[in-house]
Structure formats: structure tokens, C-alpha cells
Image (tube, grey):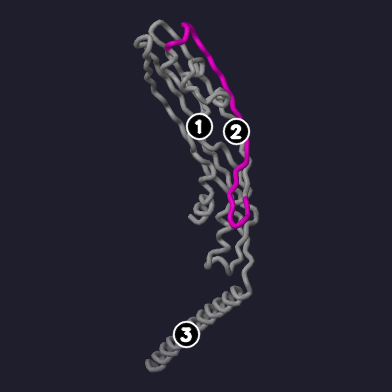
Amino acid sequence: MFLIGILSSGLYGASIDHIQTYSPDYLSNQAQTGMIDEVSPYYNPAGLSRLDKGKYVHLGLQLANGHEKMSYKGKEHKAHLTQLIPNVSLTSVDDNGAYFFTFGGLAGGGKLEYDGVSGIDVLSDLDQFKPLGVYDKGSTLTRKNLYEQATLGRAFTINDQLSVSVAGRIVHGSRNLSGTLNIGTNPTTAYKQAKARQVAQEVSKSCRCSNSRFRDFAAQIAAIKQQKLLKH
């Protein structure tokens, strides 16, 4: 539980923010809800029925790259983020509307590998750990957070001014946390002396108990011998 508590102190570094950029096209024009093209299954599925009859395929790939960090009192632990985000959309338009299918990333923070844990840095400020002089000897933390979706639907043409769509979506999400805890200590002199006195007291108490048990045993032997003498 102690390990889980420390490692989870940085758990939220891998967010589950909803991804708006389903496809790279969003980066070039964020008004995708007003567009009608092969990317519309993501942003404007009802508009697909306005496309010319035929089949449309769109493939996209984005690269998320950057740095994440967590810090405590100026001490930082960083992780480099490199995550590929694929997207696929398939559309089949007929006289009455269109069928559409999409697959791609929905949310997540990718995979992050931190070179330390801020939770360990906090220990040195806690009263119960200050005498121990706790420090990090090379702990690591790895988090992976990915959500993928697949959507299948149908767009219907009502009239020249109105079209509607219905769809079903399956979402698969994974959130994994793993790490190694490597803690060192550099106890203060006062702490060492207090521990030495505690150990000495425990040893002394143990010796007194042993001597007491020995005296009781010797008394029992003497009583047995006395009984034997009285019988003879």
C-alpha cells in the first residue's frame, strides 16, 4: 500500500482528456462541422448523405510529441511523450443516404516514463520521515493511458434541407501504472542514538526475563530434590 500511495501521487500526469483532433484535417480547419467530405464521419455524419454516390476512404496519422513533468519544491521529474494516433474513416453513399465507419483514438495521454516520483520528494517534509533522511535512489514510474473507438452508423436524407444520422460506438480503454521504488535513507545522529537506546532497553528487558525464568527453573529443581530426600 505504501508503494501504491507514492507511485499514484503522479497518476494524473497521464490525462484522459477528450481528443478533438480525430484527424489531421482538424488542425488545418477547425470548422469541420460545416464541412462535407470524406472526414465528415467524425464531425458531420449527417452531411454524408450529400456526397456523390460512391465509396470514400480516409486514412490519417498524427504524432503527439512533447514533455510532461511533475515537480515538488523545484525538483522536477520529466517524461518524454511520443505517441502515434491513427484514424480511419470509410463511407459508402447510396440514393437514400450513407453508411459510415470510423476507427481511431478517442482520449488518453499515451505512454509516459518518468525519471522519478514526486511522492518520494514529499516524504522528506513529513515529520515521521524527517529523522530518516529519505531520498530517491532512482525510482521510476511508467503510465500508459489509451482509449480507442470504433463507430458504425447510417446517414439518411429527409429532404433537400435536412438529413439525420444514427450510430453506435464501441470504446476500449486501458490505464496501466507500474514502477519501481528505490529509496535510500540517511538517518540523523539523534535518530541513531534514539534507536540505540531503544535496542539496549529491549535487550536489557529480554535478559531480565531470561534470568527470571532461570531462577524459576532452579527453584523447581531444588523442590524436586527436597521431595526425594524426604521420601528416603
The disc label shown at residue 64, or none: 2
> Could you tell me the amino acid type at mark 3?
Ser
As rendered, which of 45 and 199 lies closer to the eye?
A: 45
24 relative to 193, above or below: above
Q: Quadrant of the C terminus?
A: bottom left
Q: How many marks?
A: 3
Asked if residue 2 is among those painted magenta in the image, a careful observer would answer: no
As rendered, which of 186 and 154 lies closer to the eye?
A: 154
> Could you tell me the amino acid type at mark 2?
Ala
Circle 3 is placed at which residue position?
Answer: 212
Residue 121 lies in quadrant:
bottom right
Among the two numbered marks 3 and 1 on one chain, the one whose residue lies closer to the N terminus:
1
Circle 1 is placed at which residue position?
Answer: 19
- Residue 99 placement (x, y as % from top left): 42, 13
Residue drawn at point x = 51 percent, y = 15 percent: 38
- Dots 2 and 1: beta carbons under 8 Å? no
Is 152 left or right of 137, judged from the image as shown? Answer: left
- Residue 130 placement (x, y as % from top left): 57, 67
Among the two numbered marks 3 and 2 on one chain, the one whose residue lies closer to the N terminus:
2
